[in-house]
Image (cartoon, rainbow, N blue to C red):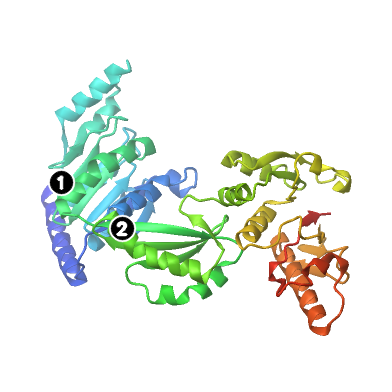
Amino acid sequence: MRSLRLCVSTDIAKAFSYAKILRKKTYMQAEIVTIGTELLLGQIVDTNAAFIGQVLAENGINLYQKTTVGDNPECIRSALEGALGRSDVVLTSGGLSPTADDITRECVAQLLGRPLVFRQELYDQLAARFARFRFKMTENNEKQAMAPEGAIAIENPHGTAPGLIVEDDLGTVICMPGVPRELKPMLTDRVIPYLREKFGLRGVLQSRVLKVCGVGESRVDTAIADLIASQQNPTVGVLASPDAVHIRITARAQTLEEADGLIDPVDAAVHERLPGLVIGADDATLEQAVDTLLVDRGWRLAVAETHTGGMVAQRLTAAGVRCFAGGRILPTSAPHRGGLDMSKLIRNVLWFDSLEMSSILGCNLLTGRRTMSEATIRLHIETLAEGGYIATSPDVPGLVAEGRSITEAVEIAQGLARRIVESCMEHGDPLPPALSHLADSASAVDLLIPVSVA
C-alpha cells in the first residue's frame, strides 16, 4: 500500500506541476480549507477563515478560494487535492484534536503518500503542558504527537494541538488548530513569517472601506461605475451592509505607505461623486459621525423611542458618544407622546423612533440639511395591516406616502414635500404655513422633516 500511495502521489504531483505552469501566475496564491462538521451544520460560525483571509491580504498574499468540509476523510482529501492543484499553499483549520473524528493529519499524510511518524519532541511538549496545569494525559493525546514524515512542527503555546507544515512537490500544506485563540497567534507569529521568507514576499495588500449612508447600493454603483470598470490597481468594489453601503478600495504595493498613496486619489474621487454621504472609513460608525456633527454644533441629544425597546439609546451609549443626554423609552401601545416635554431635558430635542430614523438623521446632518429647530413639519408613520408603512403630515395637506419600509416612506414623503414647495414657487402660490420658512430658499433640497411615529 505504501508503494501504491507513492505512485499515485507522484502522478498527481506531475499533473499539478503542469497545471501550475500553464496558469502562468506571477504571484504566490493560497487557499483555505476549514474542516469540521460543526461548521457545515451551522453550530459554529467560521471566524477562522475570515481572520486568515484578512491576514493574508495584509501581507500581499492572494487568496484564491475558501472551502469548508466536514469530518469525512474522502471530502477532506478531495478538498486538499483540488486546492493543491490551483494554489501554492493550502492553509487548513481544524481536525487536529486527539478525538477520533479529527483526522486532518491522517488525510494530509494519505494524500501526500507519507506515513505518520511519532515525534518524541512533540510528545514531550504535550506532557510538559499537562504537567504544568496538573492534568493527566490520556492515551488519545499521543495522537497529537504524530505527524506526516518530514513535516515541520509548529509549537502551540496556547493549546495541545501543534501545527504542521508539510512541504511537497504538490505544494505546501499548513495545518492549524480550529480553536481561534490558538490559530490566531500561530498564524501571525509563525506561519506568516515562514511564508514571507519561503516565497520572498515583500509587498502588501492594503484595503480601505468607505461607508456611505443615505443612499442605496444601486445609487452608489451608478455614481462610481467608471471607477469600478477601469479598476486595475487599486481595485474598487461595492457591498451592501446593514449599517451602510461599503466601498472597498484595495491596492497592492511594496509598502503600506505606497498602497495608501494609490488609494488616496480614488478615495477623493468617491467623496467628490457622493458629497456629504461618506460617514467615514474602516471602523467608523454612524453613531460616531452623528456625535461629531452634533458636538461641533454645540448640541446635546435626547431620544424618545417607541417600537424599539430603546435600541437607539443603547447604540448611542455603547458607542460612548459625547452628545447623548438621555431619553425616554415608551411601549408600542403608549398613547401619542404629544404630552411629553423632553425640552426640559435639553435645549434642542431630536426625536428618533427606529434604528432607521437614526440613519436618516445622520445623513441629513452630513448633507447639511436644515436643523430640527428650523423645520416644523411633523410626519406620522403608521403600519399598514397588509404590510408596509404610510406617512402623512398634519402640517402639509395632501402629503401621503406609502413605502415598504419606514425609510422608504420617509424618503417618498420628503420628495413629495419638496415637489409641493417647488410647485408653489413655480406658480406663485402661497406655501403651507409649515413650509413658509423655505420661501426664500433657492432650492427645497435643504428640507429636513422631523419624524414622529403614530
Position above or below: 2 against 261:
above
Is 223 placed above or below 205 here? below
Front residue of this view, candidates 416 and 132? 416
* Residue at x 73%, y 42% (from the top left corner): 309
Check residue 114 in the rendering and tell me which mark sits there, or answer none: 1
Residue 175 image point, x, y percent: 26, 44
Q: Position of residue 106 (x, y in %)?
A: 25, 43
- The residue carrying mark 2 is 205
| Residue depicted at x 47% and y 45% | 45
Q: Is residue 229 left or right of residue 302?
A: left
Mark 2 neighbour class, 10 Å CA radius: few under 14, some 14 to 19, many 20 or more: many
Q: Nearer the viewer, residue 403 or 158?
A: 403
| Residue that extends furthest to the top in the rendered view of this protein | 134
Confirm or deny contact between disc 1 and disc 2 (CB under 8 A).
no
**Mark closer to the chain start, 1 or 2:** 1
Tell me the quarter of the picture where residue 417 sits: bottom right
Identify which amino acid the numbered label 2 is placed on.
Answer: Leu
Q: Is residue 403 left or right of residue 91?
A: right
In the rendered image, is residue 228 in sight? yes
